[in-house]
Image (cartoon, rainbow, N blue to C red):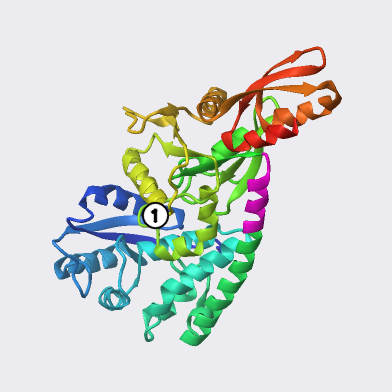
Amino acid sequence: MIDLEEKQERVLLAGVETFENSENFESSMLELAELTKTAGGIVVDAFTQKRDKYDTKFLIGTGKLEQMRWAIEVGEIDTVIFNDRLTPRQNINLEEALGIKVIDRMQLILDIFALRARSHEGMLQVEQAQLSYLLPRLVGQGIMLSRQGGGIGSKGPGESKLETDRRYIRTRIENIEKQLKKVEKTRETIRKKRKESSIFKIGLIGYTNAGKSSIMNALTEKTQYEKDELFATLDATTKLVKIKEDFTVSLTDTVGFIQDLPTELIKAFKSTLEESTYVDLLIHVIDASNPHHEVHERTVQKLMEEMDIQGIPVLNVYNKMDMAKDFVPTLAPAVQLSIKSDEGVQWLRTAILEKLHELFVAFELDLPYTMAYKLPELKKLAMVNDVVEGETAYKVKGLIAPNMMWKLDNY
């Protein structure tokens, strides 16, 4: 009988701790192991070394390299993954010294994005990022090129594209950029319509695997792909949510963040990530069960600064509290819950309502009985708290977003 199951690669991890990365080094190495599992690899061992600075030839010291060579032979290792970004020359030197495939954290993340991309736009964005990253690495023959036949670090463009000349690859990148510009124009048109609409916009933001898709599903009572894995979803998704009675908001979920997100991906996913900048309220979702949640918070906040997401109100939500141990929140104010429970969903809805009460302004108006047909429409636009029948009109009291006040003139 022929075994059709794909063989899992046995992987050796490697990382160099320097003064610059020492604060997050441990969490980053643990995350590298999770990324490797997500890509389908089996982590056999990990080698780390403290150095004042990276070795220019191998990144890691020659003594540690010798230990790795022995471990590769004994452990029947298929691939070595470095936690640090390798220069093209270091990559070649390491593959020649170790005799097997060597990739770095950046290519591993690109590989996972290639596995996760489902939409046409997502596939284009990932291919653009991969080609931009691999172009300077197409230097000569050997493992560097021949490895593209399969396994971790080979998803996406594939052998035929990567072994052609640089000119073809540059042309392909230009073609992808043209296609993405068309997609971006469509996205911009949708954003403009959304901005001109009467809908209050909420965006989900957070570290990968914090539970954003679970929150989206819980609030919308609809199903989109969610799983306990890194980068389960890449595509930006927007759905409508009823927060209080008929009052409706839009809820947008985008790709999760991670430490050292490759600049190639930030550039390629620029229009997707920018969805978070066109909202009225951000919900920052944090995995409370992760012991390194503080590192995750800082990563998200740093990327928010880089993306110029400033001045947007934020609601901090600590998720997965059912799995958290000895948890101490570091962001305040915040709500703590497990979105997998009915109670957690209700707590989140209440927290969103309380936040909206802070952000919205009170209004009172008389809606003539001749315009009574507009009452359901008004209840979608604003949070209507009281409707009293008067002599000639309904006396309506409620709360509305400040930027929507002008729309009350229609009533």
Residue 141 visible from this viewpoint: yes
Q: Amino acid at mark 1?
A: Glu
Q: Residue at x 39, y 47 (%)?
A: 300
**Would you identify the image quadrant in which residue 411 lies?**
top right
* Residue 170 placement (x, y as % from top left): 50, 81
Please give the range of residues in magenta: 188-198
Q: Is residue 9 visible?
A: no
Observer-nearest of 245 and 253: 245
Secondary structure of the magenta portion, mostly?
helix
Residue at 81% x, 12% y is 391
Figure quadrant of residue 134: bottom left
Mark 1 crowd level (few <14, some 14–19, many ≥20, 10 Å Cα): few
Foreground pick, 12 / 72 = 12
**Image height check: is 111 above or below 28?**
below
* Residue hosting label 1: 306
Q: Quadrant of the N terminus?
A: bottom right
Q: Residue 333's spot in the image, x, y percent?
A: 39, 28
